[in-house]
Image (spheres, rainbow, N blue to C red):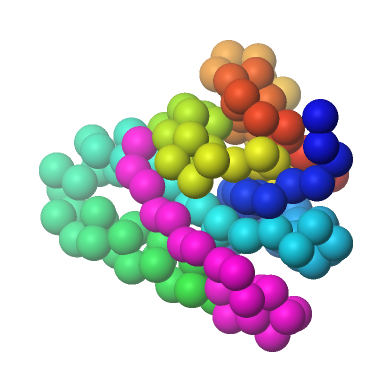
Amino acid sequence: MTLEYKHIVVAVDGSEASEKAFRKALDIVKRNDARMILAHVVDSRTFATAEAYDRTLAERAEEYAKDLVDSYVENAKMAGVTNLARCVEYGSPKVKIAKDVAGNFEADLIVCGATGMGAVERFLIGSVSESITRYASCDVLVVR
């Protein structure tokens, strides 16, 4: 078993927790001379019903996701990371990150921020970081 990571998925959503995860991932990527995959999943379930009232919601979510990932790419480049990939997916972040994104990029590590969800919501539906930890086939680092 190797202790080096070569393909590191960083789940970003613009939150303070994902910013901390990104900064931690920068260090890990540099130490391992790894590829950084910056991933954002547009949770299409959250705007599916609202889109009936506002048709531009999906377009705005897509534009936000692209701008968000682009800003992380620029920050990674400024920090000296050159082996980068971007990934914007649609669906449930809980499933997409752990299974699809990690699988498509042959990830050996996923770095994500701890959730900021309240206790009741976490109890009822679970957090994204908890689901990633449960379903990923590679190592997962949850950054507090």
**For the view shown, which residue lies furthest in the top direction?**
124
Vertical order, 133 against 39 (above or below)? above
Q: Residue 3: x percent and y percent?
A: 85, 40
Instruction: Tell me: 77 left or right of 91.
Output: right
- Residue 124, by quadrant, is top right
User: How many numbered dots are placed on residues in this image?
Assistant: 0
**Is 135 rendered above or below residue 50?**
above
Q: Is residue 31 magenta?
A: no
Any part of residue 93 in sight: no
Residue 24: image quadrant is bottom right
- Residue lying furthest bottom: 78
| Horizontal relation, residue 34 to residue 101: left or right | right
The C terminus: image quadrant: top right
| Closer to us: 136 or 92 | 136
- At which x and y percent is residue 50? 25, 43
Q: Confirm whether residue 32 shows in the render.
A: yes
Q: Quadrant of the N terminus?
A: top right
Report the residue at 48% width, 52% height from top. Answer: 40
Horizontal side of residue 86 vs 17, given as left or right: left
Q: Is residue 87 magenta?
A: yes
Q: Residue at x 49, y 73 (%)?
A: 70
Q: Nearer the viewer, residue 85 or 143?
A: 85
The residue lying at 70 percent from left, 59 percent from top is: 34
* Residue beneath the point at 55% across and 58% down: 38
The residues colored magenta run 73-91
Q: Is residue 92 or residue 116 the one in the foreground?
A: 92
Above or below 116: residue 85:
below
Tell whether 133 sits left or right of 39: right
Q: Nearer the viewer, residue 16 or 4?
A: 4
Task: Find residue 35 and report its image quarter.
Answer: bottom right
